[in-house]
Image (cartoon, rainbow, N blue to C red):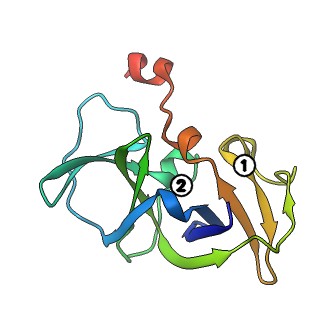
Amino acid sequence: MSQLSTFHVGSYLFGVEVALVQEVVRMNASTPVPLSPPEVAGLINLRGEVLTAIDVRARLGLPPSTSEKPQVNVVVRVDDEPVSLLVDEIGGVVEVSQIPFETTPSTVDAQVGSLLLGAYTMPEKLLLALDARALLAINESQTSAA
């Protein structure tokens, strides 16, 4: 993991491996999915391909955004399945090969920490490396309870 595509959700700066990112697009209208977990924002149509849209704020247990700016879709492909991650703002690509990789700080909320691979200390902010597979894993207990 030498390059991360970064984005903001709340006060956090996250990054996912660049190789997993298919594209970044403005928020598309989504179709709600009845009885889905709260983190499933709905389904979106991206040039004829139907994708599940995951609200990263809800997945992390954060409150809904009060900003009037529309969320951004970060389309990632994990295990050859495209999924849209709804984030507050897109960052850039960060080269992390020369930055020390650390374990997840104990100050990070436990729910957020369970979805991380670790962290990089950037000059301006802590960059949290997201585990995309863990982020996209919706607990079966949540699905069956819904």
Tell me the quarter of the picture where residue 129 sits. Answer: bottom right
Q: Residue 25's image quarter? A: bottom left
Q: Position of residue 68 (x, y in %)?
A: 38, 76
Disc 1 versus disc 2: distance between alpha carbons? 23 Å
Task: From this view, report whether residue 27 is shown above or below residue 63.
Answer: below
**Residue 108 numbered mark, or none:** none
Q: Nearer the viewer, mark 1 or mark 2?
A: 1
- Residue 11 visible from this viewpoint: no
Relative depth, front residue between 76 and 33: 76
Q: Residue 16: x and y, percent?
A: 58, 60
Vertical arrangement, residue 130 with respect to residue 14, above or below:
above
Picture residue at 12% right of the left edge, 54% below the top: 48
Foreground residue among 64 and 27 = 27
**Element under disc 2:** loop
The residue carrying mark 1 is 117
Residue 6 percent coordinates (x, y): 58, 70
**Tag 2 residue:** 63
Q: Residue at position x 23%, y 64% from top? A: 28
Q: Are marks 1 and 2 in contact (CB under 8 Å)?
A: no
Relative horizontal placement of residue 16, taking residue 25 as reference (left or right):
right
Residue 5 at least partly seen: yes
- Residue drawn at x 58%, y 39% is 134
Toward which corner of the image does residue 35 lie, by quadrant? Answer: top left
Residue 130: x %, y % from top left: 63, 53
Q: Quadrant of the N terminus?
A: bottom right
Amino acid beneath label 2: Pro
Horizontal side of residue 105 vs 4, given as left or right: right
User: Secondary structure under badge 1?
Assistant: strand
Of the residues under marks 1 and 2, which one precedes in the sequence? 2
Give the amino acid type for the residue marked by disc 1 in the picture: Leu
At 77% across and 83% down in the image, what residue appears? 124
In the displayed structure, does residue 104 sit left or right of residue 5? right
